[in-house]
Image (spheres, rainbow, N blue to C red):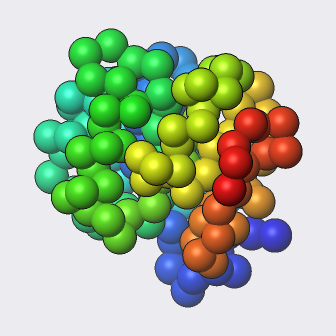
Amino acid sequence: METKELHNRKLKLIVVDDSEMYRKVMKEFLHNELDCEVIAEANNGETFLQLPNIAQADIILMDLQMPRVNGFQSAQRMSIQYPQVKMIAVTMYTDSIYLSQLVELGFKGCVYKTKFFDDIIPAMHKVLTGGLYFNEEIPIAL
C-alpha cells in the first residue's frame, strides 16, 4: 500500500538520527519509494527540538540512542509541546527495559533499523489511522 492512499497529499516527515549515512538512506527510501516529503532532519535531539517546523510534520522518525539529547528525552519534551505529531522510534535497541517506556513517552510505534524497509509502511499506516505499531518482536505491553 502506498502512503499517498492515506492522504491526498504527500506525507511530511522529520528524520532524527545521529548517523548521517542512515538518515540519507532513510530519506532516499521515503522519497523515492513512498513519495513522502522529508521536511527536516536532525542528528540529535537537541537539534531536533530547535527545528521551527515540528508542528508541520505528520510523523517524526526518531532514533533512540543519540548524543546530547537522546530520543527518549526528545520524545518526552516533544509530546508535551506537540501532542498532535505522531512519533515512530527507529532503533537498534532490543532491551525491554528501554522499549517498554516508548508508549508512555508518546511514541505511537517502533521499528528496528534492521527491518526498517519492511516495517515502515505498515507502521506509518497504523499510526496515521490512529493505532499503535510495534513489531511482534518488540516487548511492549499495550
Residue under the image location 21 percent in, 31 percent down: 47
In depth, the one of 135 and 38 nearer the eye is 135
On screen, residue 72 versus residue 1, left or right, reads left
Q: As drawn, which residue projects farthest toward the bottom?
A: 8
On screen, residue 3 versus residue 73, left or right, reads right
Q: Which quarter of the rendered picture does the N terminus lie within?
A: bottom right
Expressed as whole percent of the image width and height from the top left, the position of residue 112 reads: 71, 32
Residue under the image location 51 percent in, 38 percent down: 101
Expressed as whole percent of the image width and height from the top left, the position of residue 58 reads: 44, 66
Quick check: 116 above or below 55? above
User: Does residue 27 appear in the picture of this structure?
Assistant: no
Q: Looking at the rendering, which quadrant does residue 128 occupy?
A: bottom right
Expressed as whole percent of the image width and height from the top left, the position of residue 135 reads: 79, 45
Q: As drawn, which residue projects farthest toward the top?
A: 67
On screen, residue 5 versus residue 130, left or right, reads right
In depth, the one of 94 and 104 nearer the eye is 104
Quick check: 95 above or below 15? above
Expressed as whole percent of the image width and height from the top left, the position of residue 27 reads: 54, 40
Q: Which quarter of the rendered picture does the C terminus lie within?
A: bottom right
